Amino acid sequence: MRTRRAVPAATTAAVLLAAAAAPAVGQPTDPDRLELTLLATTDVHGHVYDWDYFRNAPFPADDSLGLTRVASAVAEVRAERGEESVLLLDNGDAIQGTPLTYYYGMGAGRQSVLADEVTHPMATAFNALDYDVQVVGNHEYNYGLDLLSAYEDDLDAPLLGANVIDVGTGEPYHQPYELVNMRIDGEDVTVGVLGLVTPGVRVWDKQHVEGVLEFQDMVTAAERWVPEVEALADVVVVIAHTGDGNVSDEDYDRTALHEDVTGNIARQVPGIDVIVAGHTHQDVPERLFTNVAGEQVLMTQPDYWARSVTETTLALVPGAAGGWEVDWSEGVAPTAQARRGTEYAEDEGLRELLTEAHGTTVEYVNTPVAESVTELLAETSRYEDTPIIDFINHVQQTTVEAALPEGERAGRTVISQASPFSRTAVFPEGEVTIADIAGLYIYENTLSAVVLTGAELRDYLEYSARYFNRVEEGAEFDPATGTNAVYPDRPEGVPDYNYDVISGLDYVIDVSQPVGERIASLTYPDGTPVGADDEFVMAVNNYRQSGGGAFPHVADAEVVYDERLEIRQLLIEWAQERGVIDPDDFFVENWQLVTAPLPAPEPTTPGEPTEEPTEEPTTAEPTTAPAGPDATTPPPAAGPGSLPNTGAPVAALAGLALLALTAGAALLARRRPGA
């Protein structure tokens, strides 16, 4: 049980300033009614400062964010409402997401946190703001249970997780709930806070939790714990690291361990007054539900990256059986609103507390690793082949090739998958830093490799291609509307990170065709069609290999490589070792989008050679160089079935794809150097 404490020194000055500027308001005039305020954040993802480490600059003024701004908002609310009547909660995903959290989670600062020589910077920030209760998010498990444990030990507030079960004991691994004693206007009020986390952790961080932790269905866990909390508390709050969800209560399958179930919890489990949602990075300050008992439930979801803190106001009246209860009467029913970072200055006390950690991170991310011979952009990577994504795939593919025993590679082509995580990532011409590479590969994924057949790989690519909206045959593809297609399981659209680009094979995606029938061509680099029974070793990140994104076959495939090397670090080391990033070393145009069926290959007369044979083999360069990022001849104007001219040689690629169907041997020159 936790009792509200005095505000720590880091924010005392801000509270006093806010109190002087704004006298207390909002106090109930009815002597039999109390007012309780809940403040909540979610998906902070390491954003303490209003600072973009990848750009080495503050975020734009119209997108100001971070806990330093949240601190100012919290201080103002405490001053207005009275410190003892305000409860501050965080809904998880705190220790992953910026170079700051990477440095102390997986980088050089990790060991100092594990050895308790340094307080985790996120714990320092949350403690300074005097958070009352927190819950684990799925990303809290990214760095392993030892780092999570060290972080939890550094927190002053309890870290909850009622549906996380210790396999060895059968009991909750984290504290299930917390009772917070508050004294409001001289009256004792107990707020019970229950914490839940999406069970997707079992998939996304399988390497850390398998055999150690189990993750229960969140509705089931809420049914187990809410009655116990309700019996002990005046007000019941659930902080659930999960989104609203799109599964109806009638179709809800508890064995499926659904990812987003806030609405199901609110409707199916009586006794909850307020539920704080998260995980989906949506900005939903207020939403009302009616549960199976006919009771109202308020849901609030703060904006991600500490862009806002939501303020929920509850009027409490004496309960029929004693204590206090939430008043849902007209005019005083609970309400919620967002206080946004753009409305507040940064709290200087919190800034000063983390000056050293912030400075260390800035120095780290601005470390040069290589020189790029040209600018490489990720902006169009989701709909056309780009060198910057091939950079990822090349490093992954060559790493697996070098590590696999000859027997594992025999008869199998090594390929690689990568996703366009960022639309803004850039390798500038000239100096490339760790920040540039971290801006391209924003997750702490590790590298694995699995065996897939040709038929399974085609299924995989078809599933990936559902990312695109279908267009009319022959229409021009519009990047602004052509991606992030919406489905019942993805009501907000398939995210960019669930679209995969494959290197090592050539393929064509026809977005004029229905989902499941879009891979118009799938061949080896020499034009030979991929056979259904052919076997491939695919380099793949651990998120995808564990089932993240629900791609077919990969989670059940044979794993032939898993040294748990972090992909981002592999990219950094590759660049450091060479000192130069040159697309000629890794860029292979091997896929394209079309909006019309490919023309059928023209038959050749049996026995008739397609070209004059040479007298002896030659290794000379082709007389016509394939188009690349430095090509001087512009592609022809877009026509029916073409992509818009974005500056990339898409038209040339279309010609090469047709050649792949009619004269595959001519494409040998396109293969990666040294392949």
Image: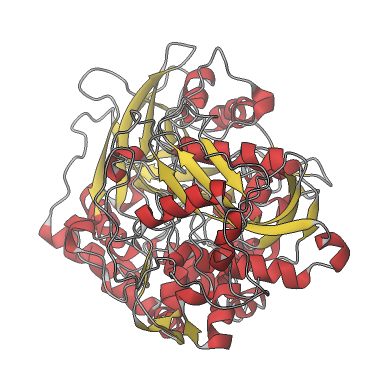
User: What residue do we see at 42% from left, 61% from top?
Assistant: 386
Against 116, residue 430 (above or below) is below
User: What residue do we see at 80% from left, 40% from top?
Assistant: 170
Q: In this view, does 624 lie to the left or right of 445?
A: left
Determine the image quadrant of residue 492.
top left
Against 505, residue 17 (above or below) is below
Residue 133 in sight from this viewpoint: no
Q: In this view, does 476 lie to the left or right of 613?
A: left
Residue 490 placed where, x, y %?
46, 32
Determine the image quadrant of residue 449.
bottom right
Q: Is residue 131 left or right of residue 562?
A: left
- Front-most of 310 and 670? 670
Against 174, residue 571 (above or below) is below
Residue 327 placed where, x, y %?
32, 23
- Front-most of 518 and 271? 518
In the picture, the quarter occupied by the C terminus is bottom right
Q: Is residue 301 left or right of residue 193?
A: left
Residue 242 placed where, x, y %?
50, 38
- Front-most of 471 and 160? 471
Residue 163 in sight from this viewpoint: yes
Against 316, residue 4 (above or below) is below
